[in-house]
């Protein structure tokens, strides 16, 4: 039996994508302008975030290679046979399915679109040495050009459709936050409180987006010592009165990430902890006031640093003060060019979406020990910034009996 290296499996009808066809056409037009500027004949995108951004398809690799090939006239998803017709149904454009009958069939499918000897654009920050070797062996590119920074720049500037989806995401993150607050009590387990928030968000995502795919929505809910890191996983730790808590909800809508993060306490808060908490809330409010078009990430960061240094708290800062939103998650994607850090000189523009999320971590054994973090999502406008997070922050609402 002659078994193909790749084939088209157009099974069923095209599914509703997160955005209209015109949105994907505009994104591809932007990418093709990047290609023209850099004199690239074809682009092979391999990251989950870029494949999803330009095609609508969010792949599940499970150790297999995936890609999106874009040329001046084609846009073709390259996906594994295990996914059958799903990549075509969920892609804006064509799709090829490669088989695993023979090693290298993925690259044969890619080459059928790119040809060989092309000037090829790639995401250099996503290609391993092994992938680079296979790329050279199968595609023999005349030149390989890194287009990752330019694609990130395109993703950082949100369309009206993206902003509308992010607004819904922020609203749903708040719903998860309220569900978590309702589940907090002395004697509850972290994992059970987290599940309440996740379930509430998934129900609302399904109600609001009935044609979407549902996966990856999650909650990090930490207590006591577990609050010292922003990305500490959920445990079965039992909550006790006086515990510091960290609420973190992350609704994922077709690959788009939004978040709510808040400091809380069970029952009461001691004076030392209250002082640190109030200082972090003040930092949060000051930081949000700095988010304006024309301000640079580095300048904002230095101003917040000075604010904390004046209060002798800068040494407890743990990471940057905010980041972009879009097609990203805890295991894929990042728009590192739009983060509030000292080494990022990006200037804020209308249409960018960024968080303000100062965090102070006081080491165990010191008064007020624990991690304090507040997090709001803001849309940069022509004249300032719009806060689209509604869940309250601070002690008045978040000391939970």
Image (spheres, rainbow, N blue to C red):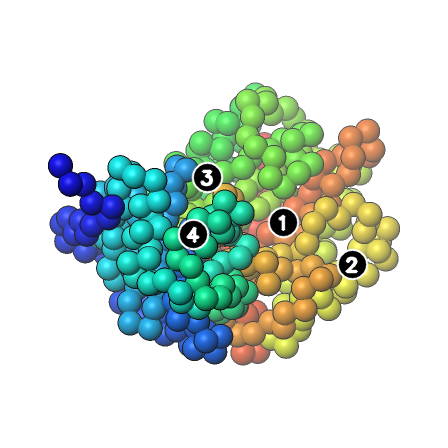
Q: Mark 3 and mark 2: span between their CA atoms?
A: 31 Å
Tell me the element at label 2. Answer: helix
* Crowd rating for badge 4 (residues with CA inside 10 Å; few <14, some 14–19, many 20+): few
* Crowd rating for badge 1 (residues with CA inside 10 Å; few <14, some 14–19, many 20+): many
Whether residue 365 is visible, yes or no, is yes
Residue 99 as seen in the image, left or right of residue 254: left
* Callout 4–callout 3 Cβ contact below 8 Å: no
Q: Mark 2 and mark 1: span between their CA atoms?
A: 16 Å
Tell me the element at label 1. Answer: loop
Disc 4 vs disc 3: which is toward the camera? 4
Q: Earlier in the sequence, mark 4 or mark 2?
A: 4
Name the residue that disc number 3 marks.
Answer: 218
* Callout 1–callout 4 Cβ contact below 8 Å: no
Residue 297 as seen in the image, left or right of residue 384: right
Per the rendering, the mark at residue 374 is 1
Disc 1 vs disc 4: which is toward the camera? 4
Name the residue that disc number 2 marks.
Answer: 305
Residue 220 position, x and y percent, is 54, 37
Is the residue 323 above or below the residue 266 in the image?
A: below
* Crowd rating for badge 2 (residues with CA inside 10 Å; few <14, some 14–19, many 20+): some
Q: Mark 3 and mark 1: span between their CA atoms?
A: 18 Å
Look at the image and tell me in which quarter the N terminus lies.
Answer: top left
Q: Mark 4 and mark 3: span between their CA atoms?
A: 40 Å
Residue at the image position 50 percent from the left and 45 percent from the top: 130
Per the rendering, the mark at residue 137 is 4
Q: Mark 1 and mark 4: span between their CA atoms?
A: 49 Å
Q: Earlier in the sequence, mark 4 or mark 3?
A: 4
Residue at the image position 59 percent from the left and 63 percent from the top: 338
In depth, the one of 187 and 71 nearer the eye is 71
Tell me the element at label 4. Answer: helix
Q: For residue 19, which quarter of the picture?
A: bottom left
Whether residue 211 is visible, yes or no, is no
């Amino acid at each position: 039996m002659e078994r193909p290296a790749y084939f088209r499996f157009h099974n069923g009808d095209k599914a509703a994508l997160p955005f209209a066809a015109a949105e994907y056409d505009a994104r591809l037009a932007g990418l093709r302008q990047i290609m023209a500027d850099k004199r690239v004949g074809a682009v092979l995108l391999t990251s989950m975030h870029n494949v999803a951004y330009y095609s609508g398809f969010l792949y599940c690799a499970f150790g297999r290679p995936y890609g999106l090939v874009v040329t001046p006239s084609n846009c073709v998803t390259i996906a594994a046979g295990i996914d059958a017709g799903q990549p075509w149904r969920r892609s804006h454009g064509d799709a090829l399915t490669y088989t695993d009958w023979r090693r290298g069939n993925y690259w044969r499918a890619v080459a059928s679109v790119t040809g060989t000897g092309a000037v090829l654009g790639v995401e250099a920050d996503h290609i391993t040495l092994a992938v680079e070797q296979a790329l050279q062996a199968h595609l023999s590119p005349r030149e390989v050009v890194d287009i990752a920074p330019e694609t990130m720049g395109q993703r950082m500037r949100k369309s009206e459709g993206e902003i509308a989806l992010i607004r819904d995401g922020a609203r749903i993150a708040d719903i998860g936050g309220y569900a978590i607050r309702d589940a907090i009590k002395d004697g509850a387990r972290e994992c059970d409180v987290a599940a309440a928030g996740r379930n509430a968000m998934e129900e609302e995502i399904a109600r609001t987006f009935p044609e979407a795919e549902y996966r990856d929505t999650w909650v990090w809910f930490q207590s006591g010592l577990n609050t010292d890191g922003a990305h500490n996983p959920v445990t079965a730790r039992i909550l006790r009165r006086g515990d510091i808590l960290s609420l973190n909800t992350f609704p994922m809508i077709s690959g788009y990430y939004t978040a709510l993060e808040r400091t809380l306490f069970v029952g009461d808060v001691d004076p030392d902890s209250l002082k640190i908490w109030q200082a972090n809330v003040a930092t949060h409010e000051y930081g949000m006031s700095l988010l304006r078009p024309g301000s640079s990430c580095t300048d904002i960061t230095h101003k917040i640093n000075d604010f904390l240094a004046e209060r002798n708290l800068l040494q407890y800062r743990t990471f940057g003060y905010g980041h972009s939103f879009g097609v990203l998650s805890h295991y894929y994607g990042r728009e590192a060019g739009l983060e509030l850090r000292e080494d990022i000189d990006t200037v804020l523009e209308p249409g960018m979406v960024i968080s303000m999320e100062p965090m102070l971590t006081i080491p165990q054994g010191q008064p007020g020990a624990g991690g304090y973090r507040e997090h709001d999502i803001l849309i940069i406008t022509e004249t300032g910034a719009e806060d689209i997070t509604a869940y309250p922050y601070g002690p008045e609402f978040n000391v939970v009996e």
